[in-house]
Image (cartoon, rainbow, N blue to C red):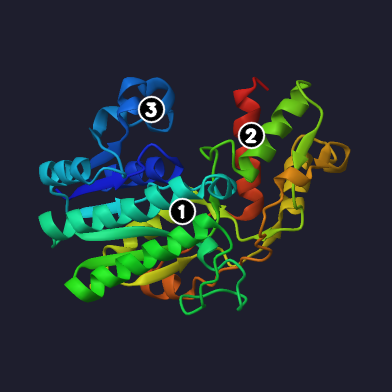
């Protein structure tokens, strides 16, 4: 039985990946903060369906000794490094902690793997935010990185660290450059979940307005449940490599609003208001991925399209408010 270790297992991606690996017969271990172990009903709600099948360990990305202890105990065959401070807007507000968690945490984990289980396969969760002010459309594995946020900068650094460990120490270390991927498990601070949760509350009559920033920002949105399967496929290849994972379609925040409100028979223009405080200091206007390499080498294809994704998220949030 293969043994996998997931950082960020309590998050959107971590929970879908844990479920997928369990279905494949893996022994699944996860790194969580101590506060999560003390308050599992609130902090591990995404894992509620499989919690009794998981092996959870307390550690922090900011503590090399704690990571070292977990790796020494688990000795995994595969390591999926998903944990990060991943909310772009917050990375502008506190770039110092974003750099510390995302860069140091990745470095610590890579070094632990190299020292304890150098034969293990390592996955690093990259991001389309690495492309930022992209010079090419669509973006491929060869597109130059031009990050436009502290978060994007940390992901470029993590990507370079992962590649450096692969090339310098011969480790099996791969990176997935994942474009935006959403689901009903997305955090409420992210714009997609903010929209669908507000739609549900507006439909119920609890509130009337949805404040947003740039409605013209374009993203390549896919379903997180599809994307974690690509992560696993990357570590099943003969040699480590880097892959863009995306749908190849781009939609605006305005498009997302229009579809989400239409699901409940409403016009978004009657409820959406523009609030300048939600604009980024440096905006990323067009992110569109070309996942040809992933499709050809991994045999990966997205199964949920944009309209299905919006519908799925709205229906979930309607259920949460009792509609």
Give the image location of residue 67, x and y in percent.
22, 44
Say which quarter of the image contains residue 269: top right
Give the image location of residue 109, x and y in percent.
25, 53
Q: Residue at x 17, y 41 (%)?
A: 70
Q: Residue at x 71, y 32 (%)?
A: 198
- Vertical order, 268 against 169 (above or below): above
* Viewer-closest of 8 and 111: 111
Secondary structure beneath dot 3 equals loop
Residue hosting label 1? 226
Give the mark nearest the N terminus, 3 or 1.
3
Left or right side of 308 for 170:
left
- Vertical order, 286 against 202 (above or below): below
Give the mark nearest the N terminus, 1 or 2.
1
Residue 315: assigned label: 2
Residue hosting label 3? 48
Q: Residue at x 42, y 40 (%)?
A: 11
Residue 309: assigned label: none
């Amino acid at each position: 039985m293969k043994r996998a270790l997931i950082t960020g297992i309590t998050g959107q991606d971590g929970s879908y990946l844990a479920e997928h690996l369990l279905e494949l017969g893996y022994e699944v271990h996860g790194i969580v903060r101590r506060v999560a172990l003390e308050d599992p009903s609130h902090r591990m709600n995404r894992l509620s369906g499989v919690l009794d099948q998981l092996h959870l360990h307390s550690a922090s990305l900011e503590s090399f000794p704690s990571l070292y202890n977990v790796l020494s105990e688990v000795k995994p065959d595969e390591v999926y490094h998903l944990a990060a401070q991943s909310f772009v807007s917050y990375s502008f507000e506190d770039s110092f902690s974003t750099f510390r968690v995302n860069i140091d945490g990745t470095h610590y984990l890579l070094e632990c793997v190299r020292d304890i289980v150098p034969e293990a396969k390592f996955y690093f969760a990259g991001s389309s935010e690495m492309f930022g002010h992209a010079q090419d459309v669509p973006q491929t594995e060869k597109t130059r990185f031009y990050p436009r946020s502290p978060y994007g900068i940390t992901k470029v650094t993590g990507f370079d660290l992962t590649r450096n460990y692969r090339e310098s120490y011969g480790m099996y270390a791969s990176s997935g450059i994942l474009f935006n991927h959403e689901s009903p498990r997305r955090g409420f601070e992210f714009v997609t979940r903010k929209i669908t949760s507000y739609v549900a509350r507006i439909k119920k009559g609890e509130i009337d307005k949805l404040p947003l920033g740039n409605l013209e920002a374009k993203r390549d949105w896919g379903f997180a449940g599809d994307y974690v399967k690509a992560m696993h496929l990357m570590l099943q290849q003969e040699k480590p490599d880097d892959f863009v994972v995306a749908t190849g379609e781009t939609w605006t925040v305005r498009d997302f609003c229009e579809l989400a409100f239409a699901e409940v028979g409403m016009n978004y223009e009657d409820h959406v208001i523009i609030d300048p405080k939600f604009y980024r200091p440096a905006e990323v206007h067009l992110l569109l991925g070309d996942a040809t390499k992933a499709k050809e080498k991994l045999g990966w294809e997205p199964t949920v399209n944009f309209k299905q994704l919006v519908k799925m998220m709205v229906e979930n949030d309607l259920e949460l408010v009792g509609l």
